[in-house]
Amino acid sequence: MGAGIAYAFLAAGSRVTVIEATGEAASAARARLAASVTTASERGHLDRDPAELLARVEVSDDPSALEGCELVVEAVPESPALKAGVLAAIEAAAPDAWIGTNTSSLSIDDLAGSLARPERLVGLHFFNPVPASALVEIVVGGKTDPALVERARTWVGGLGKTAVSVTDSPGFASSRLGVMLALEAMRMVEEGVASAGDVDTAMELGYRHPMGPLRTTDLVGLDVRLAIAEYLEERLGPRFAPPRILRDKVAAGDLGKKTGRGFFSW
Ligand SMILES: NC(=O)c1ccc[n+]([C@@H]2O[C@H](COP(=O)([O-])OP(=O)(O)OC[C@H]3O[C@@H](n4cnc5c(N)ncnc54)[C@H](O)[C@@H]3O)[C@@H](O)[C@H]2O)c1
């Protein structure tokens, strides 16, 4: 997601600094971004010179490179403790930056608790794959500065995407509904009601969803969806309890597209 978000801002003309956890991960991130830019250019999706885009990106494993940034978007894995530590490090490195968190489910108010200035944090929930997705969910915490919400709308518009605003609540609008649909689809496969392919086709053709809930889960990552379901179960009750089939697949390492297998083979 971080690479996709960085690409979106680059393609829109911004200067971008990417921070990874280690030097090795930073090299991989640089290579991934360069490959995205080259592919987009070859497919005619870029109206800018690829070399000019890549000249505007800095990749580092040192958070102090964030100093002077207007906006920092956090996109580390969905762990409250990890995110809290990273958000505090961002605030220390770039005290004047606005901060967006790409969390798919965690409470903005809880995450803001790790900041000295919680009013500078807003949820900026991008969708996968970022370049092809038209939506960003802006999640407004109890302490989020209204001026930041306005800026967020401008940033999202500048990326050529549409924003929806949601008050901070578990799973926001998109994850809460999307995960509920996916969990029910998994339970149906588990109970032998229909195959994964047929469940997805029913939603794609019957309800005009561009992608069924199980293929979407494969794309998002089964581990990511399991973590969200566990969090929603804790906050909203047993209707979000992850089905056994999801736990088993994650335990077996079948995490979806990224590992080659989830509910489908890729
Ligand atoms: N996968 C999706 O479809 C999707 C969609 C919307 C939002 N999200 C959210 O985006 C966030 C990231 O998800 P992802 O699927 O991209 O995860 P991922 O595991 O693929 O990527 C996380 C990245 O964070 C880096 N990282 C870990 N610790 C770090 C640190 N201390 N400092 C800097 N970088 C660090 C990792 O090296 C990795 O590159 C999560 O909050 C997730 O819920 C994911």
Image (spheres, rainbow, N blue to C red):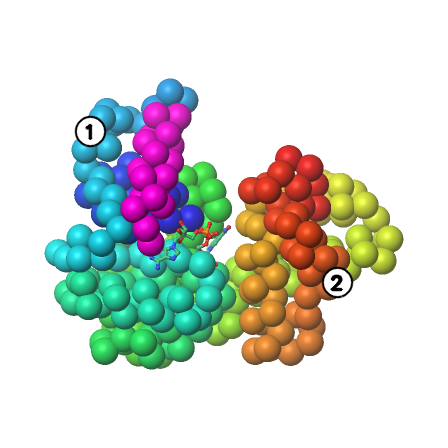
Residue 139, x across and y down, in percent: 40, 66
Task: Indicate if the residue with disc 1 has its beta carbon within 8 Å of ligand 1.
Answer: no
The residue positioned 64% from the left and 50% from the top of the image is 253
Identify the amino acid type marked 1. Answer: Glu
What's drawn in magenta, residue-wise? 21-40
Mark 2, mark 1: which one is toward the viewer?
Answer: 2
Residue at left 46%, top 66%? 79
Image height of 202 relative to 121, above or below: above
User: Marks 2 and 1, how far apart in space?
Assistant: 49 Å
Residue 210 percent across, percent down from the top left: 61, 41
**The C terminus lies in quadrant:** top right
Q: Is there CB contact under 8 Å for labels 2 and 1?
A: no
User: Does 33 lie within the magenta span?
Assistant: yes
Residue occupying the point 27% across, 39% down: 10
- Position of 43 with respect to 241 (left or right) is left
Number of numbered discs visible in the structure rendering = 2
Q: Provide the major secondary structure of the magenta segment.
A: helix
Question: Which residue corresponds to the image point at 44% horizontal and 70% vertical from the top-left?
Answer: 80
Which secondary structure, mark 2? helix
Query: Looking at the image, can residue 242 be seen?
Result: yes
Q: Which mark is residue 52?
A: 1
Residue type marked 2: Arg
